[in-house]
Image: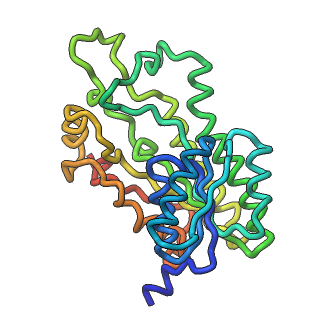
Amino acid sequence: MINTLFSLNNKTALITGGGGLLGPKHAEAIIECGGQVVLADVNEAAAKEKSDYLNYKYSKSCSSYVFLDVCDKDSVNNVINSFDRLDILINNAAKDPKIKKEGSLSNETRFENMSFEYWKDGIDAIINGTFLCSQAAANKMLTHNGGVILNIASDLASIAPDQRIYKKDNLKDDQQPVKPITYSAAKYAVVGMTKYLAVYYAEKNIRINCLSPTGVYNDHPEDFVKKLSNIIPMNRMAYINEFKGAVAFLCSDASSYMTGHNLIIDGGKTLW
């Protein structure tokens, strides 16, 4: 029964942002349930590298890759129209300024300093990309009796970022880096789009749900990891494999009566 519920045999999934951090893990979830994946990314070399690795890891041809600019309507339509059948779309592409060991966020992320160009660039891939890819995929799915769209949002689509975790010593308040409003605004929009489209296609056998992960550990600076862990009840960041079960659930018949839901997986962070 479990294998039948979660089976994605003969299903094809397109994953945007497939050359990034979580995209290949979403792909693993699909592959391990019997499906095929296409990793799409504006960085085609990264998508190829991840696709080649997946084929090597599973010792079979289960993954391919394609160049895709989610902000370009022609690019989106050309890719999605190339599919004979598209069963699953995972809208994973995003621009997310990150904390890294070699550097921090700049003070351009502050609301009072943010240029309009930074704002537009920050929301483009998430909001416009989700719109363009969902529109093209839904039109394709309508020709083959439906499908599944899974949008990747964030715990910051439910709560505001705690800017204290980004604070740097010996900087004035007006120079402190922050998580930019672009990310929160765009991810909130993704949840809203999920609910809208779920109702819109509820009678067309197209289910649209949302997954909201918290921060994933990726060799972050120790002080940042400690500060973020302190505001998570489970007292740690997420491990990179901890969303695969949710992806398998939301993309398969195991969630056949679920649509318009935002599944938050955050170690309890949004409970505080």
The answer to whether 44 is drawn above or below residue 259 in the figure is above
Q: Is residue 127 left or right of residue 155?
A: right
What residue is drawn where x is 44% and y is 47%? 154
Image quadrant where residue 45 sits:
top right
Q: Inspect this view and state whether residue 125 appears.
A: yes
Number of numbered callouts drawn:
0
What percent of the width, then of the height, locates residue 107? 41, 16
**If the image is split into quadrants, where does the C terminus sit?**
top left
Q: How is the image coloured?
A: rainbow
The answer to whether 72 is drawn above or below residue 2 in the figure is above
Q: Inspect this view and state whether residue 194 appears.
A: no
What residue is drawn where x is 25% and y is 39%? 228
Along the line of sight, the residue nearer the viewer: 258 or 22: 22
What percent of the width, then of the height, locates residue 176? 33, 16
**If the image is split into quadrants, where does the N terminus sit?**
bottom left
What residue is drawn where x is 48% and y is 13%? 113
What percent of the width, then of the height, locates residue 226? 19, 38
The answer to whether 147 is drawn above or below residue 227 in the figure is below
What percent of the width, then of the height, locates residue 96? 47, 36
- Residue furthest toward the bottom? 1
